Amino acid sequence: MKLPGLRLYALVYLLFLYAPIFLLPIFAFNDGTIIAFPLKGFTTSWFGQMFGNDTLARAVRNSMIIAVSSAVLATTLGIFAARAGSRFSFPGKGGIMGLIMLPLVLPEIIVAVSLLVVLLGMGMTLSVFTVILGHVLICTPYAIAILNTAFSSLDRSLEEAAVDLGETKWSTFRLITLPLVMPGIISSLLISFTISLDEFIIAFFLAGNEPTLPTYIFSQLRFPKQIPMIMALGTCLVLLSIVLLTIAEYFRRRGIARSGGKDTGGFL
């Protein structure tokens, strides 16, 4: 049964949702400093200004350190949690897993303020390290959600056969389990990296005097002459996010196909 009204609504909704993203590259190559139509002309000078900005370079460096560290730590913790949740039964399992996944449903502003109070109470100085702690907290549930699928779709008989053939539990995990769930691990790393790179609220509260990419962008919105450069930066970030999410989805589907599981939907 065709529903033309519903189809039209979906198209209008998607256009409204993604129109700002489509406008980013248009104004990034616009020669005028005012973000409005008609366009003034074509230029790439905003990209040159972006690459020559020392403060922006520092913010990018901090964000890359934070994103890589958060992705590695969150994925490592996610492997432990997903493995335990999908393979073992223990008292309080449901409550413990629910507590770990709680940051998915908590408002980030609440998480950020709570972390700020706790970290300052412990006498810690706000820095890149404190942002990493916050990002690991919010990225770990996403890593677990991805890795749960990878571990749940894994055939247990492969591990049992390896043990029967004389392998230890550790060597079985290293030689059999880990290679089979590696696409899920790569997907988890990429998704966690993207979430951390784009995250603003926790970085705003916990970064102290160290700029990150989102906080730098926010600080530049007060200066109209900097808006075209921000548009150029936003264009680069959108392209990077699309590439990372595409790679993550590819490895997610590849992992499901290798393990013989059923695809129940993903990011793309």
Image (tube, rainbow, N blue to C red):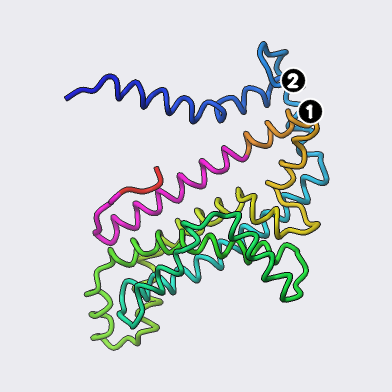
For mark 1, give the secondary structure.
Answer: helix
For mark 2, give the secondary structure.
Answer: loop
Q: Which residue is mark 2?
A: 34
Q: Which residue is mark 1?
A: 224
* Type of amino acid under label 2: Ile
- Percent x, y of residue 120: 74, 70
Look at the picture and state if 25 lies above or below 79.
above
Q: Is residue 191 left or right of residue 149?
A: right
- Percent x, y of residue 209: 81, 57
Q: Find the magenta span and give its range.
A: 237-264
**Sequence-first disc among 1 and 2:** 2
Whether 82 is among the magenta residues is no
Q: Is residue 79 left or right of residue 237?
A: left
Q: Residue furthest left?
A: 1
Look at the picture and state if 250 lies above or below 121.
above
Q: CA distance from mark 1 to mark 2?
A: 8 Å
